[in-house]
Amino acid sequence: MRAHPVRIHAFRRQRGMATIMIVLLAGMALTVTSLGVMHAVRGSQEKQVAVHASTHAQAGAWAGVEIFRQYLEQLDDSALLTLAAGDSLAMRIGERALHAGIVDNLPPDAASGAQHYRVTANIRNQDEAARATTTIQAIFDVLPGGANQPSSREPWSDVINIRGDLDMRGNIDVKGDDGAKLNVAGNVDMSGGTVTGIKTLRATGDINIGSAIAVEELFANGNIMLGGSAAALKASALGNVIISSGADQGLINANGDITITNGSVATANALGAISASSGGSHGTLTAGETLSIGNGTTAEANAVGNITVSGFPTIRAINSQADVFCVGPAWSNFDSIRAGGGVFNCPDAADRISAQATVDILLIDTLLPFTQPKPNVDAYELRDAANYVFEFREGRIQVGVRNVNGIADGTYRIGKISQGFIDLWGYLCVAVDDNGYCRDECATLIDGNCTGTGVDNLRKFTQGTSDGAQSIVYSEDRWTLSGLPGDEDPAVVAPGALWFEGDVELASGRFLNSILATGDIVTSGDHRTWAVNYAGYAQVCANAYYGELYPGNFCDPARQNLKANALGNIALLAGGYSGSTFSGGDIDLGASTRIYGSVIAGDLLQTGGDTMVNGHVTAAGLGGSSSNWAGNTIIDLRDLPPGFDPGLIPEMTAGGQPCVTDCEPTGTNQTSQATLLWSRYL
């Protein structure tokens, strides 16, 4: 038997499994990465949708706040008294459902003589399109019609009053006044700079805002232009409103046309035509003439004239007393079309389209013009009320003194005396010699000391940068005052009201004065002025440096407080009438200026650098000039001292002539005045 050899087969090594595993793992990683990216993108999209929906709902809620405020203004005292917690008011803006619920209504305190109601309400906007709801809690101060309202003749009660055009290229910030108003009798150009803290801007001309400025309410007798990222809760114009801003707008009213090329508008009412070509989301658009929509989303489109749709916008409801023109039969982004006339180029949708229907479009009432009360500014009329009157007579400075404790009323010169061979300047004396010394008091000199008659009775009423420095200089029709700026340094002039004939430059130093000038006023250097009423009793009536030299028409030592005197609310006032001719009136606030009191420029106000005013500001425009504001200007009305009222100014009658034109603001059909004091999101 032949033996067969045994064959041993070796195992073959598997090939390709590692490659397959790598491919599988890489595929899984790519899948996971793709799913993660898709999730992130979807999350980002949902977040953007939520933000957009919330923003749109918030705009509608703010429109509801304004509607509720207007509702309160239609209520008289008896109707306001019946408002009670738990009462509700249903409102609609197009298809948006708004609800106002009364949280609290505090009636006036009869014991204190108050007449204001304090109404708290929750205003809710439910935006079905955005599937979002926003609730705002708002507190309103309501003064019933027929109550003893403050006199409107004097225009000082509002924070900023400008007559003439206002060109603002800088920044303005109003602090401490939730209802701050900026009134301009002219055009307003805010194409640069920023504005914060202003609730209402009103102008008799046009308003042009081209930067990131948000104002709660705008009103113009002319046109309103909103560009950049400007936003308004409410804007009303007797002319046209043109919106190119990308921001969300609230309620827009116009006697003329409204043009929307960017952003979103909650509600637009025009007695003229409306054109909306932006891609934003709009609420209700109502036009007294034609209405054209070319983009975006609109809840409701109403027009007395024709409505024209172009592009492929989304419009829920279309209502026209005339004809409706669609973009084409393929367009179907609408819920309903109702036309008093015909329907053209629209899809075949009989269940959603009604032609030859009865359509009534409700329009807003014609807006009435805003008239700014005319301010009367005349430094000459306040001359006799001043404590120190500065004039240049017979080649020398002459000072008239009135109502100053320690100095008899009369006319004086500013002289110097010698003590220990050192000249000290700033004393009031009857006459001075050729070298500027008080004549009688320095008639004799012993050991470098003036020893003449009456030297012990002399009173130093001004302090310069040193004891011998001349703090008050007159040259070429201009007064220049300067002193030491430190908090512990003495004021440049003894406290009281100062009156100057001519122009005044207030350089570095501290002033505890109400300063009046018949010409212009300019500040420079490290300058600070406290109006008498702002400075208070301790600084004015018990001043550590000037001692017994206090103004008797302001100080009541027996009661240790200031007397009521409206002149003391003024920090700076410039300009006056010589006969029937107005002159001066310009105030130029330089860098590093701090003013504690109201500023009244008879003509124009200029600002530059960093300026702060703790009071109201008026530029009366009596010389026909325009005001230019640059730099940073802060108007701070927080923590005002007792006794200081920035809106209470002495009566001035414009050169002795009673005001006969533009003295009273135009009336309205509102029975009450409602002001939004405070709000928050719930």
Image (spheres, rainbow, N blue to C red):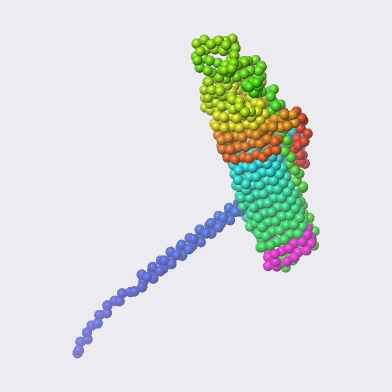
Residue at the spot x=73%, y=66% of the render?
A: 345
Residue sitting nearer the eye, 585 or 681: 585
Residue sitting nearer the eye, 487 or 440: 440
Q: Is residue 149 visible?
A: no
Above or below residue 10? Residue 682 is above
Above or below residue 195? Residue 479 is above
Q: Is residue 158 magenta?
A: no
Residue at the spot x=78%, y=34% of the render?
A: 660
Dividing the image into 4 quarters, which one contains the N terminus? bottom left
Residue sitting nearer the eye, 624 or 62: 624
Residue 229 coordinates in the image, percent (x, y): 61, 49
Residue 232 coordinates in the image, percent (x, y): 65, 47
Place residue 335 in its image quadrant: bottom right
Residue at the spot x=52%, y=20% of the render?
A: 467
Dividing the image into 4 quarters, which one contains the C terminus? top right
Q: How many marks?
A: 0
Give the magenta part as a residue range: 317-345
Q: Which residue occupies the extreme bottom position in the image?
A: 1
Place residue 170 in its image quadrant: top right
Residue 56 coordinates in the image, percent (x, y): 63, 52
Residue sitting nearer the eye, 236 or 429: 429
Q: Which residue occupies the extreme front position in the image?
A: 434
Left or right: residue 88 compared with residue 33: right
Above or below residue 4? Residue 166 is above
Q: Is residue 332 visible?
A: yes
Residue 53 coordinates in the image, percent (x, y): 61, 53
Q: Is residue 328 magenta?
A: yes
